[in-house]
Image (spheres, rainbow, N blue to C red):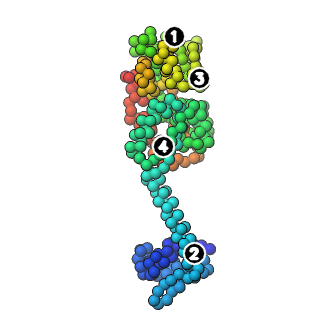
Amino acid sequence: MNVTLRQLRAFLAVTRTGSFTLAAESLYITQSALSGLIKELEQGLGVRLLDRSTRRIQLSEIGRGIHPLIEKILADLDGALDELANIKALKQGVVRIAAPQLMACTLLPDVIAAFARDYPNITIRLTDCAVESVTSRVFSGEVDLGVGPERDPNSDIDAALLFALPFHAVFHREHPLADAESVCWAELANHPLITLQGQFTERLSIDLHNVVRGLDLNPNATVTFMSTALSMVAAGLGATICIPYAASLVRLYGLSMRPLVAPEVFRRFHIFTRNGRSLSPAAEAFRDHLTRYVREHAGFSAEGMRKQ
């Protein structure tokens, strides 16, 4: 049995108009071509669907029984094709993103708001999570893409560089280093320091030790969230370290931010996707939008950060 969509649409056109002539006109084909499609359909099914006479055309008993089923099949197919067209045209869709908590409350809200102005019918679902779980959520398929700091290479995850920014020191405006235009790591090490737990501090310590032997971070306190570190800094309990895309949150706490130098250490941030898994048109559009947003905002260059 070899039934085609053209045959089914021809059958519905005849039943809708009650005329081979009108049905052919509605499908923009000749009447003989329409007759051929109906004949092929009946031969393929092995049953007569239409009873023809010189005066009128009507459904056979089998035709009356099968007509609602064919109508539903084509309606469902047309609905699916319309939905696919809307997805391709970015008139609908869902994008799922995983990002560290700090990035989720500083950079990404502005990016998402700008994207929503261009694509108001695309839904963005943002998952704020621990840095270490961003790539695992991408791997599992829980999200379409992840955004976060560099991770160890993984053959299952593609990492596209988004930006690279230098570390900054953050301290209370009455801190002894508050008047400096930049701060040396060795100077910062002479004051109480609050850092984040896990790979943030571990990777930073390795980077510093590789550049300057004997320069190690010995924090007085380690916490899980940057908001906790900033609250402690605001209370005068020490200084902390962060990436300057979080400047809006630092200002919210009324704190000062200065570049850390000697050495200047950068942290790279990537967009993570799963190898072998294609993105939806909506997810591709958001990935491109995020990349363009970063490229067009001078604050994401090292020079732009120095001017803040």
Q: Is residue 105 left or right of 117 when viewed as pictured?
A: right
Residue 124 marker: 4
- Residue at 38 percent across and 35 percent down: it is 296
- In the rendered image, which quarter contains the C terminus? top left
Q: Which mark's residue is nearer the viewer, 4 or 1?
A: 4
Q: Residue at x 52, y 67 (%)?
A: 74
Separation of marks 1 and 2 at Cα, in angstroms: 82 Å
Per the image, the residue denoted by label 1 is 191
What's under tag 1, amino acid-wise? Answer: His
Do we see residue 247 in this rendering? no
**Earlier along the polypeptide chain: callout 4 or callout 3?**
4
Residue 267 point in image, percent of width and height:
51, 26
Residue ID for mark 2: 66
Labels 2, 3: front one = 2
Quadrant of residue 196 within the rendered picture? top right
- Marks 4/1 in contact by CB < 8 Å: the verdict is no
Q: Are marks 4 and 3 in contact (CB under 8 Å)?
A: no
Q: Earlier in the sequence, mark 2 or mark 4?
A: 2
**For the residue marked with disc 4, what is the amino acid?**
Ile
Between the residue at mark 2 and the residue at mark 3, the CA separation in whole angstroms equals: 66 Å
Q: Residue 120 appears at what percent x and percent y?
A: 41, 47
